[in-house]
Amino acid sequence: MNISNRYPSLLGKTVLITGGASGIGANLVEAFCRQQARVSFIDIRDAAAEKLVRSLSQIENCTAPVFYHCNLLNIPLLQETIEKVRKTSGPVSVLINNAANDTRHDFRTVTVDYWDERLAVNLRHHFFAAQAVYPHMQHLGGGSIINLGSMSWYATQGGMPGYTSSKAAIEGLTRGLARDMGGDNIRVNTLVPGWVMTERQLAMLANDKSAATILDNQCLKKSVMPEDISAMALFLASDDSRLCTAQHFIVDGGWI
Ligand SMILES: NC(=O)c1ccc[n+]([C@@H]2O[C@H](COP(=O)([O-])OP(=O)(O)OC[C@H]3O[C@@H](n4cnc5c(N)ncnc54)[C@H](O)[C@@H]3O)[C@@H](O)[C@H]2O)c1
C-alpha cells in the first residue's frame, strides 16, 4: 500500500519518533520523510538505522532523517538526546512514542526486576519523552503526541503481562496528559495497532499456530501492514486532526 495523502501542515515540522530503526517505526520514519518533515529518530539498532537513513537519502522529494543512538531505558540520556534534537532540528512539534518490546514471558516466572524492566521498556520512556518535548510544543503554540498502544490486552492476550499492562496504561497516560497539556494546544492520542505484519512478527508467527487465526479474527480479510499504521499517524500528527485529543484510534481490520 502506498500512502497517497499529502499533509501540507507537516512540511518542515520537526518530528521525533522512538524505535524508528525497524518495524512500524521504520515505516513511520519513511512516511514522515516523504511528507518532507524534519524527522529525527531514536533506536539502539545502529546498523538498521544507518541503512534506513542511507536508503531514504536517495529518494527524491523525501527528507533525510537524523538518527540518534539512545537506549530508552536510560532516561537522563533520553532527555539529553531530545535536547540535541532541539539544537539540531528545532523544537519538536510531533512526538511519536513507538518503541516497545513484546518479548513473551510466563507470569509464573516474572521477578521484580523483570517486571520493572518490562514497564521501563514499554511505558516509562513515553512519559519522560512527552515531559521533555512539552516546553518545545508550548513554545510552538501546540503539538501532537502519539502513543502507540496495542490491541493485545483488549483481546485478552496472555503470555506477556508486563507488556499488556504497559499498553493498557498508555491509554491512561494519554488521557491524563491530554487534559494537562490541552490548554497549550497540545494533542495527545493513542494509536492502537492490530496485528501488524512486520518482519519481527512474521518471524514469530512462522512457528505459531495462531498465525492462521489472525484473518479469521479480523472483519476485513487483509493483513494490517505498517503503512496502515503510518497513514493514521500522519493524520493524527497533521492539522487535519486539530480537534482530536484524549482518544484512541484503532487500526486492526476490525478485530476488537
Ligand atoms: N507489530 C504489531 O503487530 C503490533 C501490534 C500492536 C502494537 N504494536 C506496537 O507498535 C509499536 C511498534 O511495534 P513493532 O512491531 O514495530 O515493534 P518492533 O519490536 O519490531 O520494533 C521496535 C523498535 O523499538 C526499538 N527499541 C526497543 N527497545 C528499545 C530501547 N530500549 N531503546 C531504543 N529503542 C528500542 C527496537 O530496536 C525496534 O527498532 C510498539 O509500540 C508495539 O507495541 C505493534
Image (cartoon, rainbow, N blue to C red):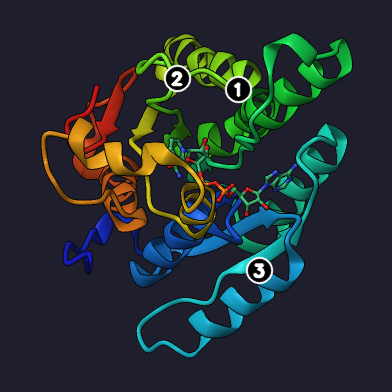
Does residue 67 lie above or below 185 as drawn? Answer: below
**Mark 2 lies on residue:** 157
Which residue appears at 60% of the width and 56% of the height? 90
**Mark 3 lies on residue:** 49
Mark 2 residue element: loop
Question: Which percent across, then down, holds residue 144?
Answer: 41, 36
Number of other residues with Cα within 10 Å of mark 3, as a class: few under 14, some 14 to 19, many 20 or more: many
Instruction: Mark 3 and ligand 1: say if the CB distance to the nearest ligand atom is below 8 Å.
Output: yes
Question: Which percent across, then down, holds residue 68?
Answer: 73, 60
Question: Which percent across, then down, holds residue 42?
Answer: 67, 54
Q: Badges 1 and 2: C-beta atoms under 8 Å apart?
A: yes
Query: Quick one: label 2 or label 3, which is nearer the N terminus?
Result: 3
Q: Amino acid at mark 1?
A: Met
**Mark 1 lies on residue:** 160
The label nearer to you, 2 versus 3, is 2
- The label shown at residue 168 is none
Q: Amino acid at mark 3?
A: Ala
Task: Tell me where residue 12 sits by quadrant.
Answer: bottom left
Which residue appears at 22% of the width and 69% of the height? 2
Q: Amino acid at mark 2?
A: Gln
Task: Tell me where residue 22 sits by quadrant.
Answer: bottom right
Q: Where's ligand 1: which quadrant?
A: top right
Which residue appears at 75% of the width and 67% of the height? 46
Q: Badges 1 and 3: C-beta atoms under 8 Å apart?
A: no
The label nearer to you, 1 versus 3, is 1
Which residue appears at 73% of the width and 61% of the height? 45
Number of other residues with Cα within 10 Å of mark 2, as a class: few under 14, some 14 to 19, many 20 or more: few
For residue 65, say whether it is visible. Answer: yes
For residue 186, say whether it is visible. Answer: no
| Structural distance between the alpha carbons of marks 1 and 3 | 27 Å
